[in-house]
Image (cartoon, grey):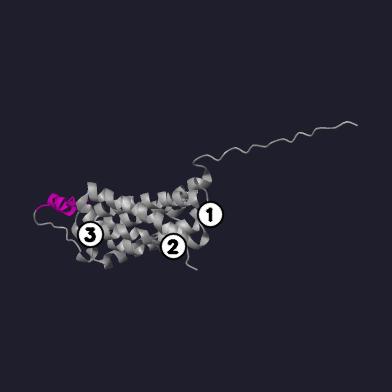
């Protein structure tokens, strides 16, 4: 009686590249098609509050990118050890730690910006975009994918607030990053020519108008319809 040894072929699947098509979509989808501000309507408060000038808006954007990407990564690493009943508390603790790091860095190296943004930096903890990505994605996916998802959502938020800030500062103050654009352009056409600013742009109403126009243009282009 002979015994036959059956050898099973071990099929090794090729590992997914760091920026595969699927992973690229984690970054690109929130920029336009699934933008957290214009499509999901999240993070509206800070979009109105910090966008009067480009400089503080840029700092806010970098802060949100840092917090969302790293909090997604950290929560994903711990996702299998976090009890379901305390997961929100753990998420808040991680986000609060990262926000505190951002706040302390600003306090140490950019104190004037810290004084201007301190309240809004602190409110990143309760930003719906941050908590939404932790709950919807990081709790059920691998760390690297979760970090890419957080990065994409934060970039989608960032380009919206930077666009709003650009037009608000330009039309409201006649400047961009503090550079007096309107004054320079006016000087090219002689002393009798002067570009006028619009005081409405430095109020929340101006931010609503610009944000509404961005939503209208984007949804017209993508064909997105609210259901």
Residue topped by disc 2:
40
Residues tagged 3 and 2 counted as in contact (Cβ below 8 A): no
Q: Residue at x 64, y 37 (%)?
A: 12
Give the CA separation, mark 1 to mark 2: 20 Å
Image quarter where the N terminus lies is top right
| Residue 137 colored in magenta in the image | no
Secondary structure beneath label 1: helix
How far apart are the alpha carbons under marks 1 and 3? 44 Å
Position of 17 with respect to 99 (left or right) is right
Q: Can see residue 191?
A: yes
Tell me what residue is drawn at x 42 percent, y 52 percent: 71
Q: Which residues are magenta?
A: 176-190
Mark 1 or 3 closer to N-term? 1
The residue tagged with tag 3: helix, strand or loop?
helix
Residue 42 in percent (x, y) is at: 40, 62
Residue positioned most to the right: 1
Q: Give the residue at mark 3.
A: 171
- Classify residue 40 as left or right of residue 177: right
What residue appears at the point 46 percent right and 56 percent down from the top-left corner? 134
């Amino acid at each position: 009686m002979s015994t036959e040894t059956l050898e099973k072929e071990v099929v090794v699947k090729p590992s997914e590249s760091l920026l595969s098509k699927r992973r690229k979509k984690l970054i690109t989808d929130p920029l336009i098609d699934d933008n957290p501000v214009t499509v999901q309507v999240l993070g509206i408060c800070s979009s109105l509050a910090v966008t009067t000038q480009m400089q503080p808006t840029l700092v806010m954007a970098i802060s949100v990118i840092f917090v969302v990407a790293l909090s997604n990564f950290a929560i994903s690493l711990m996702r299998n050890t976090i009890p379901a009943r305390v997961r929100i508390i753990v998420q808040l603790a991680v986000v609060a730690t990262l926000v505190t790091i951002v706040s302390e860095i600003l306090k140490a190296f950019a104190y004037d910006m810290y004084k201007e943004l301190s309240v809004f930096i602190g409110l990143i903890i309760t930003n719906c975009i941050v908590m939404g990505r932790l709950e919807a994605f990081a709790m059920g996916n691998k760390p690297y994918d979760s970090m890419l998802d957080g990065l994409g959502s934060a970039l989608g938020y960032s380009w919206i607030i930077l666009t709003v800030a650009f037009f608000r500062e330009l039309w409201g103050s006649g400047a961009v990053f503090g550079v007096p654009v309107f004054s320079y352009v006016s000087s090219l056409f002689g002393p009798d020519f002067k570009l006028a600013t619009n005081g409405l742009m430095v109020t929340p109403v101006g931010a609503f108008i610009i944000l509404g126009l961005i939503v209208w243009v984007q949804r017209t282009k993508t064909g997105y319809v609210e259901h």
